[in-house]
Image: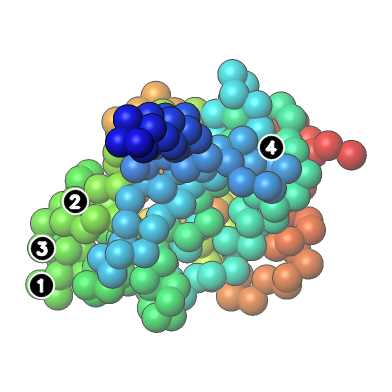
Amino acid sequence: MRLGILIATLLVSAVLVTAEPVTAAPHASHVAADDRPAVIGKRVIGHSVQGRPIVAWHLGEPGTTKVLLVATMHGDEPRPRLILQSLRDGRPIHGIDLWVLPTYNPDGLAHHTRKNARGVDLNRNFPYHWADLDGSYESGPHARSEPETRAMIRFLRSIRPHRIISFHQPLNGVDTLTKSRRFSRQVARALRLPRTSLSCGGVCHGTMTSWFNHHFAGAALTAEYGAHPSRHRMVVSAPRQVLSIWGATRHR
């Protein structure tokens, strides 16, 4: 009787082990693609001061021109993120290797503030021409002090895009003070925005685009919409215009 019970126990254990195979845990910064047809992958690049995930979505065709689009670096500039969400949530994209990061400053967006949860302007915190100009720590106590900044630096070093557009509001123009004047002209023409010098009244200290332009072969620039662009422009017109910069298209 005892032998029979022992054999039955061993058989049940074997079934349970077989039914529950061990799988490797995914890397913390990588998340599998979801059911959005345009998405081929996504990555949690880091977390905000208050622990909110910062998510980049991978679209398009790897092996083509690699582009990164970033929005909501300032939490009180929420409208352009609709462009990136529309690209993410729409039809599959051809002709470009595209990453979109709709909400770079999730704490600022949640609190309707320009800065992050520690009162730091993320677009003044990058380690290129960083400066604390007025003693208010708007730029942070030092360059790279913020987790959002460090997450972006790691991400850019990882994917090394050929082109970056950082979307903002409300100055209504495409920056001419960039590494590639041709790129500036292409973006302004496609988005139907004027070209303008976004000089911050002098030198733009500690910006993401200037840091990237200094350290990488690719080119990054800032594109600013007005204070109140229409939802139709952000969701319908602008996504198509952005893709046209590189001759990319969506599935019909």
Using the image, determine if residue 151 lies above or below residue 246: below
- Tell me the CA gap for discs 3 and 4: 38 Å
**In the rendered structure, are the residues bearing label 4 and label 1 in contact, judged by CB atoms less than 8 Å apart?**
no
Q: Give amino acid for label 3.
A: Pro
Query: Viewer-proximal residue, 6 or 236?
Result: 6
The answer to which quarter of the image holds residue 63 is top right
Residue displayed at 28% across by 69% down: 50
- Tell me the CA gap for discs 3 and 1: 9 Å
- Within-10-Å neighbours for mark 1: few <14, some 14–19, many 20+: few
Residue at image mark 3: 141
Query: Residue 19 at x, y = what percent?
Result: 50, 35
- Tell me the CA gap for discs 4 and 1: 41 Å
Residue at image mark 2: 144
- Tell me the CA gap for discs 2 and 4: 31 Å
The answer to which quarter of the image holds residue 133 is bottom left
Residue displayed at 10% across by 72% down: 135
- Tell me the CA gap for discs 2 and 1: 17 Å
- Within-10-Å neighbours for mark 2: few <14, some 14–19, many 20+: many
- Residue 245 is marked as 4
Residue at image mark 1: 135
Query: Viewer-proximal residue, 42 or 213?
Result: 42
- Tell me the CA gap for discs 3 and 2: 9 Å
